[in-house]
Image (tube, rainbow, N blue to C red):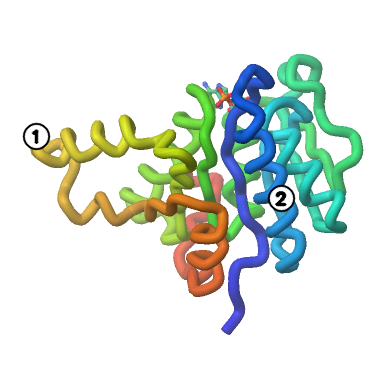
Amino acid sequence: MIGISALCVYCGSSNHVAPGYLEAARRVGLEAASRGIGIVFGGGRVGMMGAVAEGALEAGGEVIGIIPNHLQEQEVGHDGLTRLEIVDSMHVRKMRMFELSDAFCALPGGLGTLDETFEIVTWKQLGLHDAPVLLVNLDGYWDPLLEMVAHQAEAGFVRPQHRQLFQVVDSIEALFAALETAKPPSVKVDSRRL
Ligand code: AMP
């Protein structure tokens, strides 16, 4: 069976977080590289984003970054990547990340991470793809979000079966264990139709 070969990582761009988060991000990069799984990410060298890339590159992994022109300066595009694509807009960035990846994971992050994660989840909800999406709930970081989704389901806004659109794992080991048995997407809409 052909497994996951390119993992899209969504995560925070802030440097002002507990060092453990940055260390965890680095480990995700390293563990991916050691399994021959390439990383696709937002291309910045800051915060957890930069740490994921550093970890993967140090372990000899492939890392592809996609950054929009206007963020190139702010996020300081990482120049040591296997490839850095500079695109015209946030929309194209998210489309390219979708095109290049066959599984998606969200590490702790801020508002941008939420946007990216829920965009990929809602595309799945609409049947535009069936790729694995994993929420990495380190130190219970995403607990309040999971409570929110449970609340949405209780109130009838989220269908019970849609709570299965993403899988929650609580450690990096569990992330890679899940990826080992995960199937690459069998449905992936042409990104021009997104
Ligand atoms: P954050 O989680 O806010 O630190 O952001 C993580 C990533 O999400 C960064 O690469 C940001 O460029 C990106 N991002 C920030 N805001 C948005 C947004 N409104 N839509 C899509 N991506 C965003």
Q: Which residue is mark 1?
A: 155
Q: How many marks?
A: 2
Query: Residue at position x 43%, y 34% from top?
Result: 141
Residue 143 is situated, as x and y percent measured from the top left of the image, at: 34, 36
Kind of residue sitting beneath label 1 = Ala
Q: Of label 1 and label 2, which has the lower sequence position? A: 2
What residue did someone put label 2 on? 29
The answer to whether 128 appears left or right of 113 in the picture is: left
Q: Is residue 181 left or right of residue 52?
A: left
Amino acid type, label 2: Gly
Relative vertical location of residue 86 with respect to residue 28 in this rendering, above or below: above
**For the view shown, which residue lies furthest in the right direction?**
80
Q: Secondary structure at mark 1?
A: loop
Q: Residue furthest left?
A: 155
Q: Using the image, tell me which numbered label, if any, was put on residue 54.
A: none
Residue at left 45%, top 53%?
A: 133
The answer to which image quadrant residue 83 occupies is top right
Relative horizontal placement of residue 6, taking residue 72 as reference (left or right): left
Frontmost residue, 62 versus 131: 62
- State the residue lying farthest toward the bottom: 1
Q: Residue 123: x, y in percent?
A: 40, 46
Would you call the spot at circle 2 few (<14 residues within 10 Å), some (14-19), or many (20 or more)? Answer: many
Circle 2 SS class? helix
Residues at marks 1 and 2, CA–CA distance in whole angstroms: 38 Å
Q: Residue at x 25, y 32 (%)?
A: 148
